[in-house]
Each structure stands twice: as C-alpha cells, then as structure tokens.
Image (tube, rainbow, N blue to C red):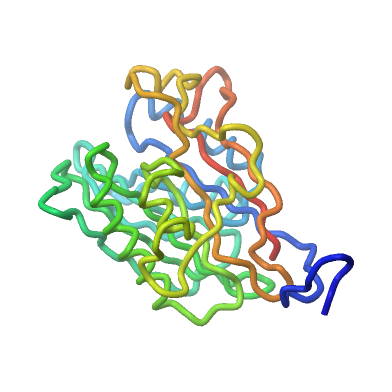
C-alpha cells in the first residue's frame, strides 16, 4: 500500500509514545569521584530516562553500590549490576542497567579478549549485561557492553561484537528491537562499529543496529572531548565512542530514533561528572 508519494514498508500506523534511553561511562572511582557522584545523579535526574545503560559503575565490598544509589536518586528504579574489574581496595567496577520499570530477566556474558594473536592484557574482563525490562507497552531487551579500549584492540573488539550479536540473537523473539550501549571504544568508521550497523558484513544473520546519534543527533556528538577537562590530559583527539544503538523498527515503528543528545556536558556546581559524555536517545515505544 502506498502512503502519500512513498511506500508503506509495513510498519502500519506509527506510535507516538516514546522510550528514553541514557548510555554513559561514569568513570568509577577515578579522579574526584565523591564530588562527581552527585553531578552524575543530577544529570540523570534532569533527563528523566526510562532505562540507563552504564559502565564503570562502582560497588564496595560491604554492599554500597553506585547502581543502587542512582536507582534511588531516580525515584526507586530497578537495577542490575555485574563486575568486571577491581579498581582499588576491593572496590569493583562494572556494567549496570537501571530501569524505571521492573527487570524480569538478566544474564551476563563474558566477551573475548584475544584475536589474531593480540591479547587484551589490561586486567579488565569484558562483559555484556543483558536485562529484559517489563515496560508498560511490552518487554524491552537491553544490552550493556564495554569493549576493549586500546587502539590496537580493533580485532578483539570485532570478536566482542560477534559475541554480542550472537547473544542478541539468542534472546529472540521480541516485539521491541534490541537496545545496545554504552562505551564501545571505537569510532563510527571502525570495522567493529560498521559490523554492528550493517556497513560491513554482519557477524550474525538478522542482527544489526541503527546508531541513534547518526539517526537523530546534531553535530559531531563527541563523547570523548577535549572540551571536557577530565579528558584533555590523555592527549587524544575528539572522538565519538559511546553509543545508543537499536535494532531496525518493528510494527508501529517502535524503535525508530526520534531524538539524540549528549549527556553530562555542563558542570554541576562546578563539577564535570565524568571523563566521558553520555548519550540520551528517544525511541518510539
């Protein structure tokens, strides 16, 4: 059936309700973490997310958890956390998913750290945390990953992408497309990101994503930026390495990206919240 001068691709009437997803590397217990923590919480409160995909989230041995504290700050959200690194004095860091709605299913996958004879020997396990969220208009499947960081880890990141895509395929069926974030440590033109977005051969049949910033962001969208005082000491170039990604839209256009913006750019009470800026994206839901 034709619609106007175009062609109806089979979505039917488009829904006008939305899901807001935030993705952010919150930098664990590094630098002035105690002063940064309230700034992180304040930025998240301001954008009013429904789901947060967070990495470098800290947890103390006695049970104090940044994920739990952020869930409370957001108004009693649900959360899941998995550790992948000990940062200092028994404090762990890892990936977390924080949700406005109940999390009804979770799983954690360890990602590869070797490819083609190159080993990620930085001492940090690489994981992908899965949470299925019981949203009011159907389940939302979220995947929070943090890939290997070094410039020579491209082949390793590609293996990690293959593992993530296999994980995503295993969680089918779903009525809302899968959501993936956060710090993928690769620019949009890198092979590992091109594999996720269909610009290179997809590693797993039927699994590919749309990059929310490419769809609906304005400007460069650099999440690693020399305008951030915590980032300038690394002597790196400006880069877009943090993402919200979502699978292709389904019936009603659910998953279609309507808006994307940076998160955590402005200081709160003089404090920049993290060395990374995050991403906020609004999706039809």
Q: Point out residue 27 in the picture as x, y percentages from the top left corner.
A: 38, 36
Identify which residue is drawn at 50% across, 24% down: 272
- Residue 47, quarter of picture: top right
- Residue 112, quarter of picture: bottom left
Identify which residue is drawn at 17% across, 55% down: 115
Relative to residue 191, is residue 31 depicted above or below?
Answer: above
Residue lying furthest front: 5
Q: Point out residue 110 in the picture as x, y percentages from the top left corner.
A: 25, 62
Relative to residue 209, is residue 175 depicted above or below?
Answer: below
**Left or right: where 115 falls relative to 177:** left
Residue lying furthest right: 4
**Left or right: where 102 falls relative to 171:** right
In the picture, which quadrant includes the N terminus? bottom right
Residue closer to the observer: 128 or 118: 118
Identify which residue is drawn at 44% across, 18% down: 229
Residue closer to the observer: 5 or 225: 5
Identify which residue is drawn at 10% across, 52% down: 117
- Residue 238, quarter of picture: top left
Number of numbered callouts drawn: 0
In the picture, which quadrant includes the C terminus? bottom right
**Left or right: where 279 falls relative to 256:** left
Q: Point out residue 133 in the picture as x, y percentages from the top left corner.
A: 54, 69
Q: Point out residue 64 in the picture as x, y percentages from the top left corner.
A: 36, 47
Residue closer to the observer: 212 or 202: 202
């Amino acid at each position: 059936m034709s619609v106007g001068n175009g062609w109806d691709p089979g979505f039917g009437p488009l829904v006008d309700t939305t899901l807001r997803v935030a993705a952010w590397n919150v930098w664990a217990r590094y630098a002035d973490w105690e002063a940064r923590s309230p700034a992180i919480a304040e930025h998240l409160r301001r954008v009013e997310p429904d789901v947060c995909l967070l990495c470098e989230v800290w947890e103390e041995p006695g049970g104090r958890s940044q994920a739990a504290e952020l869930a409370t700050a957001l108004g009693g959200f649900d959360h899941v956390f998995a550790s992948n690194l000990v940062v200092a004095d028994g404090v762990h860091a890892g990936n977390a998913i924080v949700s406005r709605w109940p999390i009804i299913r979770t799983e954690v996958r360890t990602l590869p750290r070797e490819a083609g004879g190159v080993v990620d020997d930085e001492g940090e396990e690489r994981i992908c945390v899965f949470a299925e969220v019981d949203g009011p208009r159907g389940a939302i499947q979220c995947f929070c990953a943090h890939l290997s960081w070094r410039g020579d880890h491209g082949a390793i990141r590609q293996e990690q992408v293959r593992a993530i895509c296999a994980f995503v395929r295993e969680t089918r069926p779903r009525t809302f497309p899968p959501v993936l974030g956060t710090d993928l440590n690769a620019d949009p033109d890198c092979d590992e990101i091109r594999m996720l977005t269909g610009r290179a051969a997809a590693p797993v049949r039927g699994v590919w994503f749309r990059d929310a910033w490419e769809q609906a962001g304005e400007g460069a969208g650099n999440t690693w930026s020399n305008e951030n005082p915590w980032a300038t000491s690394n002597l790196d170039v400006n880069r877009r390495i943090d993402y919200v990604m979502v699978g292709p839209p389904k019936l009603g256009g659910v998953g279609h990206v309507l808006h994307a913006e940076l998160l955590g750019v402005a200081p709160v009470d003089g404090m920049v919240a993290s060395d990374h800026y995050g991403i906020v994206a609004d999706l039809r839901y």
